[in-house]
Image (spheres, rainbow, N blue to C red):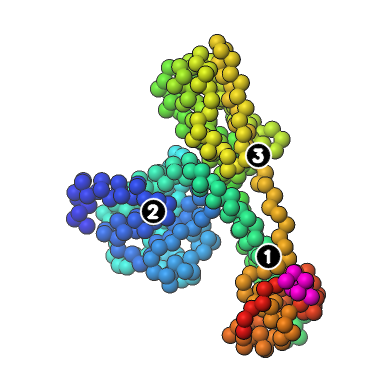
Amino acid sequence: MDEWSDPLYVLSQVERMLAATRAELLPRFSAAAAAVLPHRAAAMETGDCSRIPIKVHGDPVITGAVTSAELQRLAALGVPGQAVVAEETLGGQRRKLVVLTSAPVIGKGAMIALVPTEDALADRALEIVAKLWGVVSVSAAQRATDPEPEIIASNLAAATARAQTITDLGQTHATTLASLLAVLRSRRLGDAAARQTATDLAAAALVELRSVADRDQELSAEPASAAFDTLAAQLDPLVRHNDMTVDLAGPGDDRPLPQDIAHTARTVTRGLVLAALERGSSRVRASWAIDGGALRITVRDDGPDVARAVPGTGLTERITPLDGRWEVDAVPGWGATITAILPLGVPETPELRPLDRLNSRELEVLAGIARGKRNRQIAEELRLTEHTVKFHVRKILGKLEVTSRGEAAVLARELRLAPVSA
């Protein structure tokens, strides 16, 4: 605690966290905060990372059970710039928590929850961790809104995994609804009790599904007009403190832009405006427009040096993973107009082969079915319970869109499913 009275120590800790990669940020913050506020675990949710919005660190008993719904409820309790102490659920249990939130000018901010090891929390310790989180989250938000090309490519690859996850989620809810029907048909419950139980369960499941869908939309997209407003805030210091006149024309459209498109569009626009400034332009106009299935980012300037009016390699690397392209119109004596065209639709992925729909365990069970094994034999081979094997068989039949084990076995043989050794 006394170390935090030394300005050089404080600056060294801040410097270490600002230099952290995304994966290192939470562990480094947790280590620094532990010096003043010892804690067992930390969980973070950020609105600027569509790929991995939840990050955890510390005691696996707690972090292994953290859910998005828990963090959403905690985020609603936070007060930007302050440490809020509350008794709330995290990791499936009610605990004493310290909730830190931020609201940077750029980005959607982030929330972190700490599970302290001590009951008595000093006001000074809470104030230090709150200020520390405020500094770190500003830097994290800036980096999230200006992703590197490899991050963009990784996010696009993750889109396919997200689609598969959504499919699995739908199948899980289908199973839940089937179970509810079983409750309604049960002879062990009276009609009124069965209906009430099933109704309550179904309503809760639908509310949770809607919550997940809304949160996924919030994390993966933002309205075009709001995205442009963020750009305007980023360019404001340049506009106010420079002789160059910068006109900004937003899209006037609230259709959602995928996060990767919005981040890249802001990066490209800023880069083109700065390039125009370097070429000696006195007036620049930057605009966004949604034209059909693409976002058109146009920067027009009156700079005389049109020979250099070519998008830099760095900007090209930004739009390439998104299948973007350039249009350049440069006329000596008149200036240049550079347009980046970013398709809004994610390229369609090839249709999955039937067996690609199955996970590794389901493939093992299917291999047993193809060899004519019964559920009990498959369970013994895979060291599973017979009930678990039955569950996997139902999932397999649904994913392969067949109605019997025999049809599944024929399909497995036709598609040459690799045998699984016993």
| Cα–Cα gap, marks 3 and 2 | 32 Å
Q: Is residue 408 visible?
A: no
Residue 343 is tagged as 3
* 134 drawn magenta: no
Question: What amino acid type should be assigned to the residue bearing mark 2?
Answer: Leu
Q: Which mark is residue 25?
A: 2
Sequence-wise first label, 3 or 2: 2
Q: Dot 2: what SS?
A: helix
Q: Quadrant of the C terminus?
A: bottom right
Disc 1, disc 2: CB below 8 Å?
no
- The image shows residue 279 at horizontal and vertical percentages of 46, 19
Q: Position of residue 70 (x, y in %)?
A: 50, 62
The kind of residue on which mark 1 rests is Asp
Instruction: Report the residue that reaches farthest toward the top.
Output: 333
Disc 1 versus disc 2: nearer the observer:
1
Element type where label 1 sits in the image: helix
Figure quadrant of the N terminus: bottom left
- Compared to residue 362, the image places residue 166 above or below, namely above
| Amino acid of disc 3 | Pro
**What residue lies at 54% left-to-right and 51% top-to-bottom?**
154
- The answer to whether residue 170 is seen in the rendering is yes
**Residue holding disc 1:** 356
Question: Looking at the picture, does residue 259 appear above or below residue 191?
Answer: above
Q: Earlier in the sequence, mark 1 or mark 2?
A: 2
Which range of residues does the magenta coloring cover? 410-416
- Viewer-nearest of discs 3 and 2: 3
